Image (cartoon, rainbow, N blue to C red):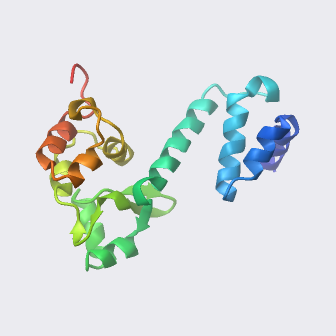
Amino acid sequence: MRTSRALAHIAERMPRERLLEAVGAATDTDVLFRSLREAAAFGAEIEPDDPDPLTEALLRGSEMKREMLKAEGGAVSAQELAGHLSMTPQGLGRKRERNQVFWLEAGDGYVYPAFQIGRDGLLAGIREILGAFTVEDPWMRVNFMLTGDIRLGGRRPIDLLREGMVDEVVMAAAAYGEHGAA
């Protein structure tokens, strides 16, 4: 009930062109995120009742996660990746637990970023990269792979990995999350 009231409140106050853009999004989830993003970005126009100071940051974080889930082929289910790797979903679960595959928690289960999939299984170097990380957060690990890194001349680790530059990506992964100069 509160969600419906909040969305109605946003829709009433959002400028018409922004509302039409949000409603024209491809999926229901996109409509929701665009509406909420506009509400956070244009708070002065919408004048929420009791704005939470963390709302904008939470929305940005949610949007980043959503974009990571869509990037480089999206994410695949355990069933799909297990099939590609010619193993059972339980075997894939063991690989996840042993830190041998990129994964993300989504809803009640796990999804696996498609960027790690090669023609004949996982891309060469995935296990080594995962073993080199000092950060535990799976979202940060995926973000590392999809974002330009100063240690790699501003290039994305996934691009270098596809070019066979495993050692360079492993070294950058080992330093990822450390404070100080690169």
Front residue (pair 81, 94) = 81
Residue 100 point in image, percent of width and height? 22, 59
Judged left or right of residue 16, residue 80 is left
How many numbered discs?
0
Residue 87 at least partly seen: yes
Quarter where residue 178 is shown: top left
Residue drawn at x 52%, y 38% is: 61
The extreme left residue here reads 167
Judged left or right of residue 122, residue 27 is right
Front residue (pair 119, 33) = 119
Quarter where residue 126 is shown: bottom left
Residue drawn at x 31%, y 56% is: 102
Residue 86 point in image, percent of width and height? 25, 80
Residue drawn at x 88%, y 39% is: 12
Quadrant showing the C terminus: top left
Residue drawn at x 18%, y 56% is: 127
**106 in relation to 83, above or below:** above
Residue 103 point in image, percent of width and height? 35, 57
The extreme front residue here reads 163
